[in-house]
Amino acid sequence: MKNEYYPFSHIICHHFYNQGGCSFCGYHSQKRTVSESPISVDQMIEHFDLFANKFFKNIKRADKLIIAPNGSWFTEIPKRLRHHIYKFINQNYISHLKYESRASLFIPEKARQELKIMYLATTDKNINVLTDKACDELTMALEEICSNHIVSFGLEVAYDTDLNRLNKRCCLDDYIKASRYVHGKGAQVCANILIAPHRIKDPVYKAFITARFGAEEMKAEEFLIMPCGPMKGTPSYDDWIKARWNPVSSTAASEIFRIIREQYPNIKIKYQDSMRIFSKHGRHGKFKRKPGRWSKKEKQKVRAKVRKISENVF
Ligand code: SF4
């Protein structure tokens, strides 16, 4: 745990119960990120308070608190903890609270289906009663969105067919509707762009198209751009092991980031090399980038190729 970023990881994302969730996402299987046994809301609050006390200065300096759950703020973070965090933000005059959500939670019939699937996999109690209750709670939770919130959506790649391939179970229309809802509450939208996930053709071109969709259709105020790497325990890792997928190079990914940043100067854009972060925690298993350093010439060639592709979009 560090800075203004609080990795809330006590509960598994509800989407995981739908055929393992997004095919590139290995959060659910990481010992470091999911509690081995259920913990109470009081314990979660205590855990948050420990984090907030320890990193208070960093949070104040950033003037922002980012909560990164294994899944969605509205379904994975219990109501009492959400309200505890709102109180913390308000009492300490922190300007922004940022959290993640699946776009499908803003579409009532899709949210119902997702929650029902989770209950089917996790309980033998009355599924319909539980789903009704969870949907009612979700409707109320969405009302909590307000002007100092930034809601982050895992857009990943702006093609419906690709979202299907990645088992994202959200479509582009969901992202548009969810963003409109968030903006209607006076809050801001962050679109997460995943560079070159597995099973995607023309990934560089699609990263630019995704940025354009985030800017023009979702009207996002922020982008989070991440190169996709193979995470252990996921189909993406199997694809990499079986040499069906070659993850994007750091040079190409950072060039994509630079071009998008140039293109959208009014959008706040952050680059996160998830591979570097996750490698530290052993989440990529045997994954290593191409050994050795690339020559300057080799890097220039890759950058030029990426720039050429961007000219077809911008
Ligand atoms: S990427 Fe997000 S929505 Fe998909 S399974 Fe992982 S935590 Fe859940």
Image (tube, helix red, strand yellow):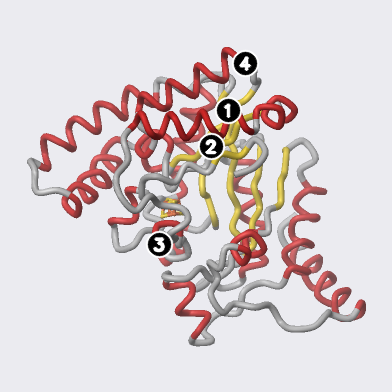
Q: Earlier in the sequence, mark 2 or mark 3?
A: 3
Q: Earlier in the sequence, mark 4 or mark 2?
A: 2
Vertical relation: 58 (above or below) 243: above
Q: Which of marks 3 and 1 is nearer the N terminus?
A: 3
Query: Where is mark 4, residue-wise?
Result: 92
- Real-space CA distance between mark 1 and mark 2, rounded to the nearest whole angstrom: 8 Å
Estimate the x, y position of residue 8 in percent, counting from the top left.
Answer: 47, 41
Amino acid carrying mark 4 in the image: Asn
- Real-space CA distance between mark 2 and mark 3, rounded to the nearest whole angstrom: 19 Å
Q: Which of marks 1 and 4 is nearer the N terminus?
A: 4
Amino acid carrying mark 2 in the image: Ile
For numbered disc 2, what is the local secondary structure?
A: strand
Q: What crowding class fits label 4: few (fewer than 14 Cα within 10 Å), some (14-19), or many (20 or more)?
A: few
Query: Where is mark 3, residue-wise?
Result: 29
- Real-space CA distance between mark 3 and mark 1, rounded to the nearest whole angstrom: 27 Å
Closer to the camera in the image, 4 or 74:
4
Residue contact between numbered discs 1 and 2, judged by CB atoms under 8 Å: yes
Residue contact between numbered discs 1 and 4, judged by CB atoms under 8 Å: no
**Outermost residue, right side:** 296
Q: Earlier in the sequence, mark 4 or mark 3?
A: 3
Estimate the x, y position of residue 138 in percent, counting from the top left.
Answer: 31, 30
Query: Where is mark 2, residue-wise?
Result: 67
Q: In this view, does 142 lie to the left or right of 285?
A: left
Number of numbered discs: 4
Q: Earlier in the sequence, mark 1 or mark 2?
A: 2
Q: What crowding class fits label 1: few (fewer than 14 Cα within 10 Å), some (14-19), or many (20 or more)?
A: many
Q: Nearer the viewer, mark 4 or mark 2?
A: 4
Q: Which of marks 3 and 1 is in front?
A: 3
